[in-house]
Structure formats: structure tokens, C-alpha cells
Amino acid sequence: MREISIHNNLSKVAKNIVVNVDIENLSKNQIKRIVKQVENGYATGGDATTSYITRSILREYDIPHFIVGNEHNHHITWKNIPSDHPMFDKLAGAVAITKLTPPANDGGSYYMTWKTGIERLERIITERPSTGNTDLYDVDFTVRNKVLDVSRIELDKDHKGYDLLEKLPDMTEFPLIIGREEYEYPLPYEVVEKDQEEYYA
């Protein structure tokens, strides 16, 4: 597979990159996978063609969704989800179980990093932001998937995204937009804190 490199100078100023994908080169199963994931408001953070296309549709059509890490990472991002979404309840349960077996508090950096991670998750559970991101690395691996398994949100039947899904199998070309901020769904209070830091810098 040939990889295309983009010079760092260009990447700093480019808002996004558009790749025109030949839909006819996708299999029927790949198209079905894209449609199913968009309908479920869900995509993985992997490098598969279907993942790129799904993420592009979710972003450009402003569809409420989750992006979860693949087997190589534990990151999860979400956008425009309701405060009563079950993800928050599952996260609360996972954090409660994780706190039952904390690492040894020896004053070392590992414990402090774990403690900071748990406190960040607890704030998310309390405030239930509609858009945000977090790393689940500090969550006990035996319950981590319980959070990921409910990280879906069904697409409203009246949403404009459904029009695209109906046309997708018959399209010959799809403008895949790879954005600079593809994974940057900051928590609301992190945006405020960053602005304050820049103001006082």
C-alpha cells in the first residue's frame, strides 16, 4: 500500500483534506458496514477505509455519535449525546469497581497519574457533557468494554443523514473529508481552562 505524506508546513494551515473515494471499489459488505455504523452513531478510530468514511459522514452531517479506540488504545470521544445516555451510567459503574482495587499509594507518579485519571472520569460522570473525550486506560480492563458496548446512539429517522445513506450504494464517488480536528472533541470546561491559560500567558 502506498502512503501519501503531507508536508508539515501544509498540515499546519490546512483545515482539512478531501479525498475523492471511488465507491465502486468498495464491496457491498463495506457499504453495509458504513450504513450500519452511521445508523448507530458509532465509528472506530482505526485506519480502515470504512472507518474513515463513517467518521467523515458523522462529522459533516452533524450526526450525534461516538468514536471509540480500536484494540490498540482506550480512547473514546462523543458528540451531541443526551445527558441521560447510558454511557455515563456504565462509566460510573466501571469507575466504582476500579476504585475498589487502587494501585499502592506509595507517593509515586503512577498512583498520582491514576488518581488524576479517576478524578477526571468522575467529573465527566457528574457533569455529563454532551460533547467530550476521555481515555479509559485507568478503568479496570475487566469492565472497560461495558462502557464501550453502550457507546452507540441511534440516528433519528428524520435526520438529513438518512438521505445520504439511501444514496450511498448508488454513488460513484464520495468526498472523504479528513479534518485536522477529527478527534478533538474537548470537554466544555477544558476549552474554558485552555482559553484562560492563553489569556494569562
Image (cartoon, grey):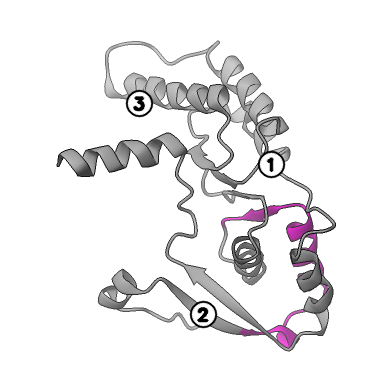
Q: Residue at x 53, y 49 (%)?
A: 72
Give the percent coordinates (x, y) of residue 104: 39, 12
Q: Which residue is drawn at 57% across and 49% down?
A: 69
For marks 2 and 3, the one nearer the N-term is: 2
User: CB under 8 Å between callouts 2 and 3?
Assistant: no
Residue placed under numbered mark 3 in the picture: 113
Give the percent coordinates (x, y) of residue 56: 60, 67
Residue placed under numbered mark 2 in the picture: 18
The amino acid type of the residue labelled 3 equals Thr
Above or below, 12 relative to 173: above
Which image quarter is the C terminus in?
A: top left
Q: Distance between the residues labelled 2 and 3?
A: 38 Å
Callout 3 secondary element: helix
Give the percent coordinates (x, y) of residue 118: 46, 22
Numbered badge on residue 194:
none
Q: How far apart are marks 1 and 3 (CA)?
A: 25 Å
Above or below, 103 relative to 88: above
The image quadrant that residue 117 belongs to is top left
Left-right relation of 15 to 9: right
